[in-house]
Image (tube, grey):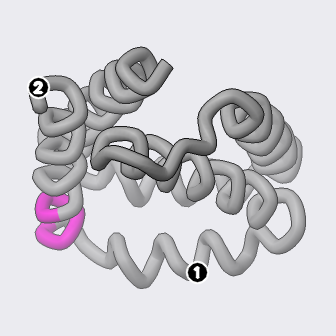
Amino acid sequence: MTGLLATVFGVYFLCAGLGMLLRKGWASEIIDEFENSTALTFSIGALILMASTAVLLHHNIWTGWREIIVSIMVWGAAIKGALILIYPAALFKFARVYIPNDKVTKVWAVAVMALGAALLFL
């Protein structure tokens, strides 16, 4: 299961990172639209929390680097889903601090792509 999850996360990180790298202002647009839609915020939070909880029931493994990275990402997703449902303003504030402009977004994009590549090829 670790290989499957690493592949899923890896493909997602490569595509999301490449999208952020190629589309100027895209990350900020996503945050703006997400923040302005209560229904979308709730729905995505619920979906993330439910999906990550389901995965955690089968993958909460803390041996081997790949297993640990996948478990950390799934726990992070569960926490993010809960935070979106409980206190979404904190998530939006965090996002605005760490994605303040396109230069910083490009750094994050490269880092996300590097993690995706590591998950796929290591």
Residue at 48% from the left image edge and 71% from the top image edge: 95
Image height check: is 106 above or below 6? below
Image height check: is 22 above or below 45? above
Q: Residues within 10 Å of mark 1 (few under 14, many from 20)?
A: few
Q: Nearer the viewer, residue 107 or 39?
A: 107
* Residue 23 in sight from this viewpoint: no
Which numbered disc, 1 or 2, marks the residue closer to the eye? Answer: 2
* Magenta segment boundaries in residue numbering: 103-107
Q: Considering the numbered disc 2 on the image, is that residue within a helix, a strand or a loop?
A: helix
Q: Quadrant of the C terminus?
A: top left
Q: Nearer the viewer, residue 21 or 9?
A: 9
Q: Considering the numbered disc 1 on the image, is that residue within a helix, a strand or a loop?
A: helix
Q: Position of residue 31 (x, y in %)?
A: 53, 57
Tell me, for residue 44, which label it has, or none.
none
Q: Is residue 32 magenta?
A: no
Please give the residue where the numbered disc 2 appears in the rendered image: 121
Q: Position of residue 17 (x, y in %)?
A: 23, 41
Q: Residues within 10 Å of mark 2 (few under 14, many from 20)?
A: few
Going by the numbered disc 2, the residue's amino acid type is Phe
Which of disc 2 and disc 1 is earlier in sequence? 1
Please give the residue where the numbered disc 1 appears in the rendered image: 93
Alpha carbons under labels 1 and 2: distance apart: 34 Å
Asked whether disc 1 touches disc 2, contact meaning CB atoms under 8 Å apart, the reply is: no
Image height check: is 68 above or below 89? above
Residue at 85% from the left image edge and 52% from the top image edge: 38
Q: Position of residue 40 (x, y in %)?
A: 78, 41
Residue at 11% from the left image edge and 52% from the top image edge: 110
Q: Is residue 114 left or right of residue 4?
A: left
Disc count in the image? 2
Residue at 29% from the left image edge and 29% from the top image edge: 10
Prevailing SS of the magenta stretch = helix
Going by the numbered disc 1, the residue's amino acid type is Lys
